[in-house]
């Protein structure tokens, strides 16, 4: 079974631009969560989607948004990029079959100049 | 929000030595997960724990869910060079939702493990 895939793997943007990151979960997994990882703050939860609905949200500004499609693929968008948005953005999927195990993709490394 | 205190922050050991790291929380968790992350990659799930007192092994790795539900530890026996990486604990706080629909993971800051051949 293929793992979680994320595209692109690397992105360079400038301040003020917007960016869209994509995540394809493990086949059959319907829950997709997004995390931001930085050296200073570690791994921080952004939001979680299930059946195209956002069920949980972390403490990030409204510039961070996401959505999930009917095939469970998910995208996250960051508008009006700031230097501090430079991070590794990780997507994780879960089957929700009685376990809380989340499986991570390789991440998208975003650099904001 | 929830905080997980993971220690030590870093470890430098010789190949063949055993390693132990732990995570503590001020509140109760109903799940503990241990992940390993290599540079430039996403975290890989090593062990999942669901019951207080549960002791689970995965090869040379052993993890336990603390009886108080506020801590967990991970042991690595007979370390080898490929054990190098950052180890994270993560968990789901017990928010009283027995349905388990809250899939927000809280992570520790990680333990950087270096193994000297």
Image (spheres, coloured by chain):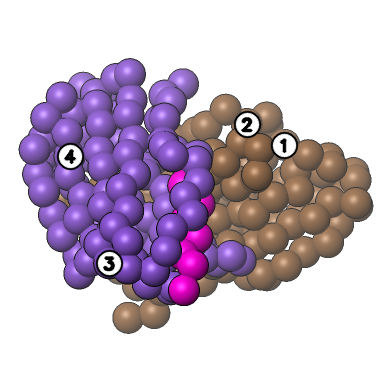
Chain colours: A brown, B purple
Residue in front for this viewpoint, A38 or A93: A38
The residue indicated by pointer 4 is: B65
- Look at the numbered disc 1 and give the secondary structure of its residue: loop
The residue indicated by pointer 1 is: A63
Residue B15: which disc? none
Q: Nearer the viewer, mark 4 or mark 2?
A: 4
What is the magenta range?
B110-117
Q: Position of residue A37 (x, y in %)?
A: 60, 47
Q: CA distance from mark 1 to mark 3?
A: 46 Å
Label 2 in the same subunit as label 3? no
The residue indicated by pointer 2 is: A60
Q: CA distance from mark 4 to mark 2?
A: 30 Å
Residue found 42% across the figure and 64% down from its top: B14
Label 2 in the same subunit as label 1? yes
- Look at the numbered disc 4 and give the secondary structure of its residue: strand
Query: Dot 4: few (<14), some (14–19), or many (≥20) neighbours within 10 Å?
Result: many
């Amino acid at each position: 079974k293929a793992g979680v895939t994320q595209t692109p793997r690397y992105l360079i943007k400038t301040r003020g631009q917007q960016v869209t990151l994509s995540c394809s979960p493990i086949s059959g997994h319907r829950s997709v969560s997004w995390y931001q990882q930085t050296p200073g703050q570690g791994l921080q939860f952004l939001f979680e989607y299930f059946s195209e609905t956002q069920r949980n949200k972390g403490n990030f500004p409204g510039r961070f948004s996401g959505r999930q499609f009917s095939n469970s693929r998910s995208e996250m968008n960051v508008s009006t990029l700031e230097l501090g948005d430079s991070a590794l953005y990780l997507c994780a999927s879960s089957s929700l079959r009685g376990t809380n195990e989340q499986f991570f993709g390789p991440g998208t490394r975003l650099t904001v100049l | 929000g929830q905080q997980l205190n993971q220690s030590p922050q870093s470890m430098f050991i010789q190949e063949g030595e055993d390693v132990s790291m732990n995570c503590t929380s001020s509140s109760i968790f109903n799940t503990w997960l241990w992940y390993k992350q290599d540079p430039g990659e996403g975290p890989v799930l090593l062990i999942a724990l669901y019951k207080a007192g549960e002791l689970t092994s995965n090869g040379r790795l052993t993890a336990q869910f603390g009886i108080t539900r506020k801590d967990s530890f991970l042991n690595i026996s007979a370390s080898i060079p490929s054990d190098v990486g950052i180890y994270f604990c993560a968990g789901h706080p017990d928010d009283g939702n027995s349905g388990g629909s809250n899939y927000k993971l809280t992570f520790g800051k990680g333990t950087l493990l270096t193994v000297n051949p």
